[in-house]
Amino acid sequence: MKNVLQWRFLPSQKVMLIFLLVLSASFVLQASSHREAPLIANDPLADNTDLYAFRSPDNPNTITIIANYIPGELPFGGPNYFTFGENIRYEIHIDNDLSTPGDDIIYRFTFQQVNEDPSTFFNIRLGKQNLKTTFTMERSINGGMSFQTLISNGIVPPNNIGPRSIEGGTGLGATNYESLIQAAIATTSNGEKVFCGPVDDPFYVDLGGIFDLGDSPRQTSKIRDGLAKYNVHSIAIQIPISILQKDGKNVDQAANILDGDFVIGIWASASRRAIRTLNTDGTAPDDMGDWVQVSRLGMPLTNEAVIPVGFKDRWNFETPYQDLSNLNVYGNFFYNPELALYMDDSQFGGAVPAFAGLRIQSKSLGSFDFRNGKDGLFGLKGNPALAGTALDDAVFGTLLLPAAASPRAVDLWPIFHTGVPNLAPYQLATGKNGNPLAAGKPFINNFLPNGGDMLRLNMAVPVTPRNDPNFSPLGIVQAAVLGLTNSTYAGNTDIQFIPNMDGFPNGRRLEDDVTRIELQAVAGVALAAIGLWYDDYVPGSTPSPVTNLLVNVLQYSTGVEANDATFRSEFPYVAAPWRGTETGQ
């Protein structure tokens, strides 16, 4: 793919800025999180920041999907506050059927703006807004071949500028900002509920520490949530499960709480026109040509912390459905992730003291080495012990156990690219009697190997109430801990709801600490959960697999463990945006 910027003066004295995007079949688009790639960092209005998908805690017959855009919005960022961009297609894509290629459902949002009072430099004055923004919501149920308009002229609340602008008589005269949020929530004739507008950024992470060569938790300076008191713009949709399920079934028709027919894959994107003409008279640019995807987001932190900088832009211009055909380009970033080098004392582990508690199995059960460049479980290839498991070539072994020197193809790669099946060995070590390849206690099934990097969610899994004492931002990691140690769950191998089975990476809840979970996953916590224990567990001589190395990984924390604002208990769940006159860093 080649990007050419061409400037020239035309007879009409227009300056042409032409983005010639030559797309080839070898490109895959994927973006993940805040300012993750060089090109999209220069286009914040089209930049995906985060994607969430979870079964609605107060309305469990629905799924809530939240796609956020525009990173690092200062609440006091006037006079030109951020809002959704015109001439951008913001889309939420859903794959629900293994038998059909590509997207099955697409929700498309486009935004329109008007200056209601061009005579002032204020954003809000005397009941008028600059820019007043509305949205159009469309839906396709045939993979994007046609769209139906569901909402026209939907309301986008203004930015939460301050009390004089929002509540004051010389401003909007609103009762309060909350009234603007509630007035902006719309419902379609199909029963989807939707909100588009500014909100508190729900992602929490010490960005300064993480990108200072992995200094998280910081060793010598104060830990800081790098996104605290910043806003983003959200597109939030609450959708009946019967709309998302491939056969139109309600969730009470699921065969069990891990029914594979209720798995969906979700990703979000933004697209722009290929050609932009800048006018010398100061009027808005003219956009024309084909729509070109410029941003994508599925799993959090993929493009930020897995894809090397030299591949990030290319990654951003492809779709998840191209990922499998591009394994020769991208596969090794997951099979042998860079982060794993800093959790390995034979490589660069000593250079990143913050990761001292994160160490990958090098001799699990005495023989299996999952460090970069090692073989992991590949030495079992063709072994009769794999028969009938997910690693059998007659099942999914060609995907999950593809080659030597690809140790994390068995765990990290499926977490990001296919989801995890409810088959041995991907079951808890409970009931396996020391054999990780044996059947154990089921705790996840979000397997949908249609494409690549997406959030995958099994909609049949029940909700963990947010006030449940077992609710945890560690998601599936905490579900595994309970399934292995709590007698309520560890005494059998039945399919049984364990709190937090509805958490990341089975979808993503707003509360989930995805940075911590993903670093623990790189350190091999998923391998340990299924019985591939850490090196200090010695079969036959160590009485319990809960060893010091396992405890170190489970206790690891970046130091930022919760959002700076309280989430709502009802749709749209995200917190109100920070007010420009009341926040500080």
Image (tube, helix red, strand yellow):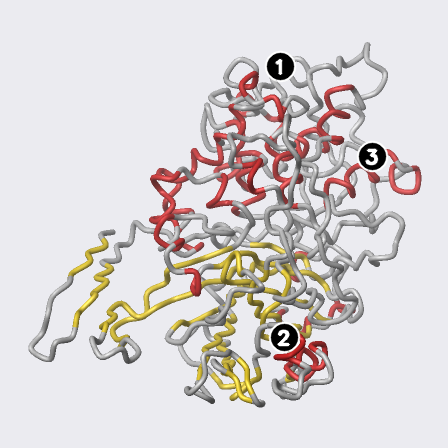
N-term mark: 1 or 3: 1
Residue tagged 3? 484
Q: Are marks 1 and 3 in contact (CB under 8 Å)?
A: no
At x 77% / y 68%, what residue is drawn?
60
Q: Residue furthest top?
A: 541
Crowding around mark 2 (Cα neighbors within 10 Å: few <14, some 14 to 19, many 20+) is some
Q: CA distance from mark 1 to mark 3?
A: 23 Å
| Residue 39 spot, x, y in % from top left | 34, 53
- The residue type indicated by label 2 comes to Ile
Badge 2 element: helix
Residue tagged 1? 367
For residue 247, which quarter of the picture? bottom right
Q: Is residue 500 left or right of residue 192?
A: right
Q: Which residue is more in the foreground, 7 or 244?
A: 7
At x 16% / y 75%, what residue is drawn?
14
Determine whether 218 is above or below 346 in the image. below
Q: Which residue is more in the foreground, 221 or 193?
A: 221
N-term mark: 1 or 2: 2
- The residue type indicated by label 1 comes to Ser
Residue tagged 2? 243
Determine whether 38 is above or below 363 in the image. below
Q: CA distance from mark 2 to mark 3?
A: 35 Å
| Residue 92 spot, x, y in % from top left | 52, 67
- The residue type indicated by label 3 comes to Leu
Crowding around mark 3 (Cα neighbors within 10 Å: few <14, some 14 to 19, many 20+) is many
Q: Is residue 521 left or right of residue 408?
A: right
Nearer the observer: mark 1 or 3; the answer is: 3
Q: Is residue 534 left or right of residue 10?
A: right
Q: CA distance from mark 1 to mark 2?
A: 47 Å
Q: Residue furthest right?
A: 487
